[in-house]
Amino acid sequence: MTDRPGTLLEVRDLSVRFGAKEVVRGVNFDIGPGEKLALVGESGSGKTITALSLLRLAGDAVVRGSAVFQGRDLLVLSEREMRGLRGGDIAMIFQEPMTALNPLMTVGRQISEVLELKQALTHDQSWNAAIELLSSTGIPEPARRAAAFPHQLSGGQRQRAMIAMALASRPQLLLADEPTTALDVTLRGQILDLLADLQRQTGMAVLLITHDLNLVRRFADRVAVMEQGVLVEQGAVTEVFANPRQAYTRRLLASQPQRDLQEGVPDAKAQPVLRAHGLRVVYPTPLPGVRGWFKKGEFVAVQGVDLGLLPGRTLGVVGESGSGKSTLAQALLGLLPHRGSVEVAGSTWQAPAVRNTHANQRLRQQIQVVFQDPFSSLSPRLTVEEIVGEGLRVHEPGLQGAQMRQRVEAALREVGLSHEQFPGLLARYPHEFSGGQRQRLAIARALIVQPRLLVLDEPTSALDVTIQQQVLALLQRLQRERGLAYVLITHDVDVVRAMAHDVLVMKDGVVVESGSVAQVLDTPREPYTQALVAAAH
């Protein structure tokens, strides 16, 4: 690789080691002023640790090589000099704004702190500048949002606040670490367009760290591909995507969800495993003034949903954040009080559904759930045997220890986990597995009680593209073999195309369009559906 004129950052022979383990080896790349470079690869490939090492934020890692930023090697500067650069000439947007923002400070105060520190503004000047920055990121009512705490903002608003904070010091280089992973498809597009617009206005360079290749196509000028700590290929986005030289790059590009379902007309005699009619979920809200002393208002989160689902079929539920998807799922699972009727395997939830009566407990055996983030849904204090066998202890308490262990081992084998791969598998803990393997554990936990219906709440959104493809293939195989029905909650249109037979599109708690996958996604009638489909490409 030859140096290009006007280079802003030159990284040469970068290596990062934790103890005896080298996680990044001999990485070379450069970024020019105003350029957008995407660093892509699977989880564990070394993308994030590469970016963190540039800012000397990689903890106890031993970092070697050079990273020359405007003639100064970042890896040999003193800590005092680095503090001047961090959040100044080089800023960073982290993957999860809820954990990166201080929950005890308003977002406006967090931004104004940066302005006071980096630009020596007064308290009033920095507060007004913080509101202007929030306004520049497209947040509605920026003055009111500046006075809000992070938990009072939506996911997209929190990410915009993080961007405003990063831009407060007018950086020349922005490191954006998976800035859209936790956002729905339309918000992803909005955040990406916002970054591109701000980049054009300020002339800053952007290093985008992501595993979403659609985002790379849409945003970046050049792309660098990492595999197991090594940079294996780089070049212009159009060139690398059209003619990838490395097998790993070709595998990444081919890792799109594949449709492998039982197609055809469903059996007319089959009884629905799930039916809902007039489903409505309402939350009480305080009323202003004296009226609030005597009565509560209502916020309708789900309004009048009707649906039916046959065995062996998948119903996809799509919509933006706040559309009511997850609330609908919780109502179907009997986890929220609701109005209207929900029938699972021929039985209805005994009111109130949230009570764990004997009838409701029997019904819970028929409908299980797989959550979005397997790391937070699996107890870190329980072993694999305890996690997967948990449902058996509730629904089949008469099983003896040996019988239960056999059932646990069978469920694990069914999802592709065995003692041959993982010696001492049953005694291991969740942190000893990768993200995809943890999601397989979550699926095994759901399947062990022999349900007829699974609610899949964003089951692959926390996984990179190749692991996502493997988990979706596993779910499709299980559906064919067991005749399982799925309710798939997602904002990923490509996952819906691969997994679903029918689709509901939700907006503001209401189903605005429904029908087969081909009808809804190929020829959408509603402008909202058209926007969702367009944002996915």
Image (tube, rainbow, N blue to C red):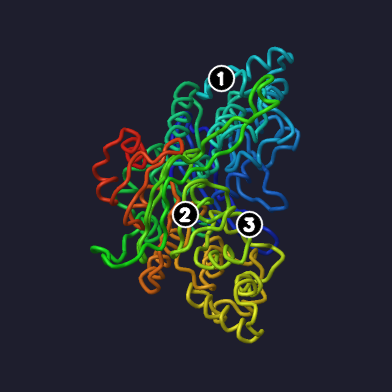
Looking at the image, residue 69 lies above or below residue 271: above
Name the secondary structure under disc 1: loop
Q: Which residue is mark 1?
A: 141
Residue at the bottom extreme?
A: 402
Mark 2 / mark 1, whichever is N-terminal: 1
Mark-to-mark CA distance, 2 and 1: 39 Å
Label annotation for residue 372: none
Mark-to-mark CA distance, 3 and 1: 41 Å
State which mark lies toward you, 3 or 1. Answer: 3
The quarter of the picture where residue 99 lies is top right
The quarter of the picture where residue 185 lies is top left
Label annotation for residue 342: 2
| Count of marks overlaid on the render | 3
Amino acid type, label 1: Glu
Residue beneath the point at 31% across and 64% down = 261
On the picture, is 353 further left or further right than 345?
right
